[in-house]
Amino acid sequence: MDKFQNQFKAVNSRQLADLAQQIKKWGQELGFQQLAITDTQLEAAEATLLDWLQQGCHGDMAWMAQHGNKRTRPDKLIEGTHRIISARMDYWPPDIAQAEEILAESAKAYISRYALGRDYHKVLRKRLQQLSSKIEDAIGPFGYRVFVDSAPVMEKPIAEKAGLGWIGKHSNLLNKDAGSWFFLGEIYTDLPLPVDTPAEKHCGTCRACINSCPTRAITKPYTVDARLCISYLTIELKTAIPENLRPLLGNRIYGCDDCQLVCPFNRFASETKENDFFPRHQLDDITLLQLFNWDEKTFLNKTEGTAIRRIGYERWLRNIAVALGNANKDAAIVAALKAKREQVSDMVREHIDWALQQQAC
């Protein structure tokens, strides 16, 4: 981005402030609920990340330790970066089955609310690119790059410093007026825009998220051990789920929302207006057996364009097998597990055998 940075030296602070406000207006017109701007200084976040990695809390996510300090020093990832435009977009779908009711029905499948519709990466990246194009139309060529959870980017510390919210005790970003049911995306740019005020923390003495975590993955306020987190176990982990943790997963087959469901700030959350985030194929209210009976072709067809597809069919079956083991005893479940047993990989078969043992207890 160096080739563009000198052209903005003659632009005065008032013009830059006006541009920043216009960018935020354009962002809202494109469907973002809020945009804010910050600089690239993330020293505190870097120290926290290094300590977290040192403790091994990232589990098998080796990519978290890669790229040196490019993750916490944006100008090293994209040379010439001076500012970061951080954006958030609500995703809680309207008129969906109540999450708590689904979690209470052991025969139903619980999928994290963010994954029920279209893959957010695609939606946000397209909108951020459209925003960048609007800026370019207004001021001419400038240096930028769009990110949506697609590179070594510290999206939550960036959003916190920009003022979109604060990182809560469950490690998710919280906004006092909008809760936490939203996605984040960024534009790294060489534009010397004025920065916004960082957010203050408002969790106080509340421990609702810590106390609600099924696996006690929130080991202390603001620290999540991924190795215990159900989202990690069902999405990131590529091998067998530790046997001692399987009963704690309940019927959660893709991600976990428990810490957000109990957060008092989510009473202020708004439903999304984005049709792309509405549930597909009744995934907000569907039985485990229905999903377990999908063959791979059906899985690929039904999850096309969604975040779920990234785990692949093998892990999909692994996760559902665990949930079936946790379900109330049912002859239909036993029959389905036995019927699938000889058609799957050794890893999935291990989880099916575990589930059959649980059903027999």
Image (cartoon, rainbow, N blue to C red):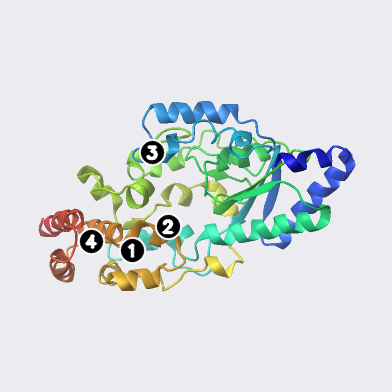
Q: Would you name the residue on which mark 4 appears?
A: 324
The quadrant of the rendering that contains the N terminus is: top right
Residue at x 48% of width, y 58% of height = 114
Query: Disc 1 marks which residue?
Result: 109
Instruction: List x then y, in percent, for residue 190.
Output: 73, 41
Work out whether mark 4 precedes mark 3 in sequence or the reverse, and give the earlier one: 3
- Give me the C-alpha separation between circle 4 and circle 3: 30 Å
Going by the numbered disc 3, the residue's amino acid type is Ala
Q: State the residue at coordinates (44%, 60%).
A: 307
Q: Position of residue 32 (x, y in %)?
A: 66, 57
Image quadrant where residue 7 sits:
top right
Residue type for callout 1: Ala
Identify the amino acid type marked 4: Leu
Which disc number belongs to residue 112? 2
Which residue position holds label 3? Answer: 62
The answer to whether the residues at label 1 and label 3 have Cβ atoms under 8 Å apart is no
Give the number of the mark in front: 4 or 3.
3
> CA–CA distance between discs 1 and 3?
29 Å
